[in-house]
Amino acid sequence: MSLAAMVLADRSAPLARLYDRWIELATLGRAGRARATVLAEVQPGDRLLDLGCGTGTLAIAAAAAGARVVAIDRSPSMLAVAREKALAAGVAVDWREGDVAFPPLAGEQFDVATSTFALSEVSTDLVALAIRRMAEALRPGGRLVIADEARPSSAWARVLVGVPRAVVAVLSFAVLEGSSTTHRHAWRALVEEAGLEVAAERRMPGSLVLVVATRPPELPQVRRAVRPLDEVLPEGARAVAQRVGAWLALPVGVAPGVYRVGDPGPASPVLLTGNFLGSVDAVREALADRDAYLVVEDSDGWNVWCASDAGRFTAGRAAALIELSGLGQRTPVRRIVVPRLGGRAARPLAALTGWEAVVGPIEASDLPDFLADGLGPQMRSLARMFGPRQRIRVGALTALQLALFLLPLRLLPSAWRRSAAPIALLEGAALPLAHDLLPGRTGVVKGAVLGGATALAGAACGRTGLRGALTTLALAPFVGWVYQSSSPVVFWKRLLR
């Protein structure tokens, strides 16, 4: 399975109608059997909560079997399909639009709470909060039933499942720019963290697992530990390798969570960042002489601006960590500083948590001045944000990426490729240095301008020849695209909205 199916279904009602077929295909026909196993835990007359109901297949079957069903999903397109299916089946279901971690429930109690093929679509912290919500909604003795993806137990099964997952990951990233394969959560641990008692855990064919748990008479309030930040940072040779990867802007992540920097107290500031190692290191360095709480949300290892632009730096993930850790009980101020390049998450984060969300500076190095000024407005100019050190780094990263992307040029005749590839590498390294001098708002336009000027100059001087000049000109927009994917400056206005 893949997030691609969910993303496409969210975007289009016609595509939502194909979701059931996709799930059957992705599970090799095992989805129906998995749902039947879940339905075996539901009795006539049960009040059922189906979280992440999708197109309502399980909810409709449960209602047809005599259960009173409340079904929740975040996708209006899939809920529309679900309502049509329920009407055709002649059953009544209470359909509600909402997020799995923040479901629209008003203190209602249920006999059974189910989720099938939905929780693997979201990050671990959101799943932990969603399971806690289901546990809170169950009556004492009520049952939680989850059927979803898990890591296969045998090496052969891991290969069999891993190959199509890898193909889907590449295709969905290329087409949807950020979607990936589903998560394989540690289901038993997450269920037990919510205070439920696991009654059964059963492997099903392929990569599916069924977990059944019951709610005890008293549901314990478990809070995640708030540890020192240094405990999760890499050390030794591993630290060197990971920080080189982070310098190259590879998605090198640290464990998400709420951490202590120094010895914070009730009045200490709370700051938010993504779990990209470079971002965490920058914030830690900036706060070297201060005490603070740092919320490191799961941005899939990407830096804040990349994750924000791809929809991976979200208010929901941050809100889940705040609640799971009980951070509000540690700091009565209830104010959090959101990085400016992830500032679009500030307003929804305030709505989800009731906290004040303050948009902070772009650069972590500006945090001390920002905090000293009483969280006043503080924003670097574009020139300061993209200084010489950052330009050299982005140029090196662009050239490195181009060296890999241009390998297929070796298949072209030598007359076409002899000078085109070296010139493209030089253009990639030069684009950030010449950023302010080139016309255009995007890297593609700036790359086309620089490439066009280079091609004309090379042809005029007789250095590249006509074919080399044409190849350089054709590659120029691609060089600019690679550059803009490596630099937040190109999209800084969009990210700062």
Image (tube, rainbow, N blue to C red):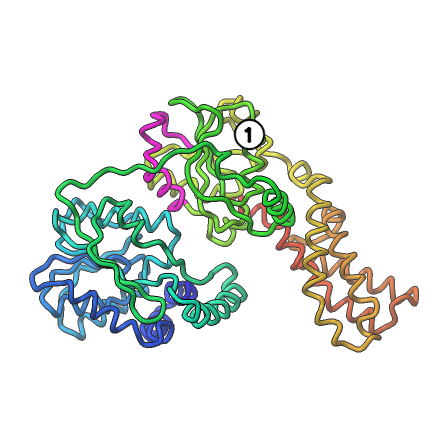
Where residue 127 appears, as percent x and y from the top left, is 33, 51
Q: Is residue 459 above or below residue 353?
A: below
From the viewer's side, name the closer residue of 248 and 388.
248
Crowding near the residue tagged with mark 1, few <14, some 14–19, many ≥20 C-alpha atoms within 10 Å = many
Would you identify the image quadrant in which residue 478 lies? bottom right
Q: Quadrant of residue 119?
A: bottom left
Residue that lies at the very extreme toward the right in this rendered image: 461
Count of numbered marks: 1
Asked whether 332 falls inside the magenta stretch, the response is yes
- Give the amino acid type for the residue marked by disc 1 in the picture: Leu
Q: Position of residue 484 (x, y in %)?
A: 64, 54
Q: Which residues are magenta?
A: 315-337
Q: Is residue 53 visible?
A: no
- In the image, residue 442 sits, relative to residue 270, either above or below, namely below
Please state if 228 lies on the left or on the right of 48 as rendered. right
82 on left or right of 311: left
**Residue bearing the label numbered 1:** 367
Question: Looking at the magenta stretch, what is its main secondary structure?
Answer: helix
Q: Is residue 447 magenta?
A: no
| Residue shown at 84% from the left, 64% from the top | 456
Residue at position x 54%, y 66% in the image:
174
